[in-house]
Amino acid sequence: MPAGFAAPGVLFAGNSSAPDRAFYRQVFNKLPRDQYTRYVEVGVGSFAAALVAANAGIPPTCMETSDVTLYTGIVGTYVSGGDLAGLGMTLDGEPVEIPDAPPHEQAAHLLYVHWLARMQAKPEVDYWTNLVTDMVEREAEHKARLAGSLKQIGDRLPGVKFTPMCMWDHIALAEDDPHAIIIAAPPTYKAGFEKFFDTGGRIEWAEPKYAVFDPDVDMQRLADHMRDKPALLMFLQEERSGIAAHETPVFAHPLGDVARAFVISNRPEEIFKLTGGPKVALGMSRSTGPTSLPIIPPDYQVTDQSRVGVLAAKGTEVDYYRDLWMHRLAAAPGSYNMLVVIDGFVAGVIGYGAETMTRPYPGATKYTTHLLMRFAFGAPHYDLRLTRLATMLALRRDTAKLVFTGASEILLAASNGLVTVEYTRHPEAKGLRGLMQLESRAKHPDGYKLSYRADWVQDDIPTTLTTFLAKEKAWRASRKKAKK
């Protein structure tokens, strides 16, 4: 279960996937240049689709882009040659000072301040505190990487225009232009970007007025609104129901077992003339997707009366939450996967493995009576370290019984507990303190490789919850006292 380190590249990961961008490239390559002289992209994000368009030969000088997040405001203002000071960015009520440096380094500084504030707003658990520590200790290196990425985007999009603006307002300015093509990749979840970029109120800026996009309503609204407009529209829709916002989507590919990604256009037949007909991408790499249960809100009040449960889950479902909560860092998949559920909310994930017993390393006999805890990870929460609750639940033999069934029951019956491995920058994983015993510590190029062991716990779930809440209360009190 790697603790993970900060990776600036994650900031530039686009909202569209490789299949979507490949389809856009096919359209852009054949788009009549004399007919479409105006490229408009709303919710431009990290400029991924705009870069595809530029690579296909669409001049950046004819591109108009917009978004409402501060992240894209910084990137877009830099790329378009705008005034970064005009963003009015403040941290804890004080203006963020812009260094005397080249524009791409100035923008990198603002991105770094925003990024650090987002990480500091996360729950005080090992994973997030390790990321913050890494960001602070390697500030210069992170800023240099951000500056390099920004300069690459700027060099590839000379002359592009950017304006902080609500997508609906920007669409209204272009929808009646027959020479305009409008591209959009709206949020898949209501207020998804607001939650992703949340700093707990520490950062403010000259944010434009905008309407929060509700995909359950607004995907269809966008398709209906643009149906008879002169401008050509293409937008990305990710939909678990499998029902597209237009009766004739121009492109589709699967997202996990039930969800689909569609590209919707207001004039499918025109797109088909460019692509040779509707396109479907099959055999894609393993995709993840959430369950039907909502994620626990970060301010949700958990009490000793809360209903806590553990449920067997698909690997694709568990991986979805790990990707969401682990900052997109890779981790080994679990063979036996579970969800932690509190009052009907997904609050954590657990993954077990049996390799320590079924395929032990030669000579590694110390842990052959223990199963492997690949990961136990909790959802972000303002007050509680839910990763500790997930770990405490994982250490219950009765929890493991729910997934070690059939032939694997014999492994569980023969096991004495769990082992896990942490890769961290520190000589101890504080998140496991008091839960598992540190068995070995080895130097690693990025810090330490720590091996932990614990025997099975016999507590029932209500007892586990009561113990967890009591320890969290004591932990918060000790931290409050230490800060005085």
Image (cartoon, helix red, strand yellow):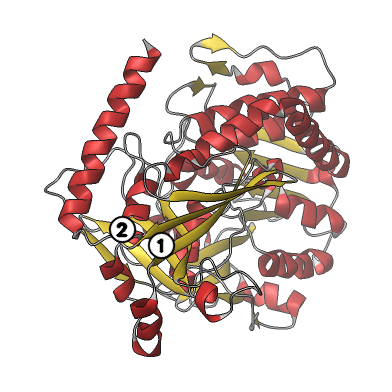
Q: Which residue is more in the foreground, 118 or 186?
A: 118
Q: Furthest-left residue in view?
A: 305
Q: Which residue is more in the foreground, 385 or 203?
A: 385
Whichever of labels 1 and 2 marks the residue nearer the N terminus, that label is 1
Name the residue tied to disc 2.
393
SS class of the residue under badge 1? strand
Q: Is residue 137 visible?
A: yes
Q: What label sits on residue 34 in the rendered view?
A: none
Q: Residue at x 70, y 34 (%)?
A: 75
Q: Residue at x 65, y 31 (%)?
A: 135
Please state the total of marks drawn on the protein image: 2
Q: What label sits on residue 350 in the rendered view?
A: 1
Spot occupied by residue 237 in the image (x, y as percentages of width and height): 52, 64
Q: Amino acid at mark 2?
A: Leu
The quadrant of the picture occupied by the N terminus is bottom right
Mark 1 burial class by Cα count in 10 Å: few <14, some 14-19, many 20+ = many
**Location of residue 4 with respect to 281 vertically, above or below:** above
**Location of residue 277 with respect to 25 vertically, above or below:** below
Q: Amino acid at mark 1?
A: Ile
Q: Residue at x 69, y 72 (%)?
A: 271
Determine the CA span between mark 1 and mark 2: 9 Å
Spot occupied by residue 375 in the image (x, y as percentages of width and height): 48, 59
Horizontally, residue 96 falls left or right of residue 9, namely left
**Location of residue 158 with respect to 328 vertically, above or below:** above
